[in-house]
Image (cartoon, rainbow, N blue to C red):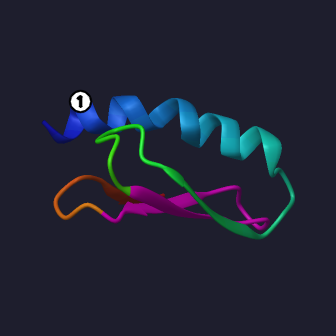
């Protein structure tokens, strides 16, 4: 189940990495995994990693 949810989030992660290369930035977007929660995310300028967590309990969260 978690792999299916992360598969829905992966295109968002790829887009955030491309759009924010070299920037420390945070934001929120509607969650593509559950469609009801808000996905809070953070992008690191240092290594390009993206961290995120959905506001819906048990949906998705990750840290690269």
Quarter of image, res 63? bottom left
Q: Indicate the position of residue 32 as horizontal and vertical percent values.
A: 41, 38
Quadrant of residue 11 within the rendered picture? top right
Instruction: From this view, report whether residue 30 is shown above or below residue 27.
Output: above
Q: Residue furthest front?
A: 36
Q: Is residue 24 left or right of residue 15?
A: right
38 left or right of 24?
left
Residue found at the far right of this picture: 22
- Tell whether 51 sits left or right of 33: right
Q: Is residue 12 above or below residue 60?
A: above
Task: Compare residues 31 and 13 and report the one nearer the observer.
Answer: 31
Residue found at x 64% / y 64%: 27
Q: Against 3, is 38 above or below?
A: below
Q: Position of residue 20 (x, y in %)?
A: 80, 51
Q: Quadrant of the N terminus?
A: top left
Residue 56 lies in magenta, yes or no?
no
- Say which residue appears at 35% left-offset and 40% top-offset: 35
Mark 1, residue position: 4
User: What kind of element bears circle 1?
Assistant: helix
For the record, the magenta segment spans 38-55
Question: Residue at (78%, 70%) from the top-left corner?
Answer: 24
Outermost residue toward the left in this view: 1
């Amino acid at each position: 189940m978690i792999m299916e949810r992360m598969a829905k989030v992966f295109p968002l992660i790829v887009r955030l990495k491309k759009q924010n290369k070299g920037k420390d930035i945070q934001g929120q977007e509607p969650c593509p995994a559950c469609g009801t929660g808000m996905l809070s995310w953070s992008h690191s300028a240092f290594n390009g990693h993206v961290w995120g967590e959905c506001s819906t309990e048990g949906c998705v969260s990750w840290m690269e």
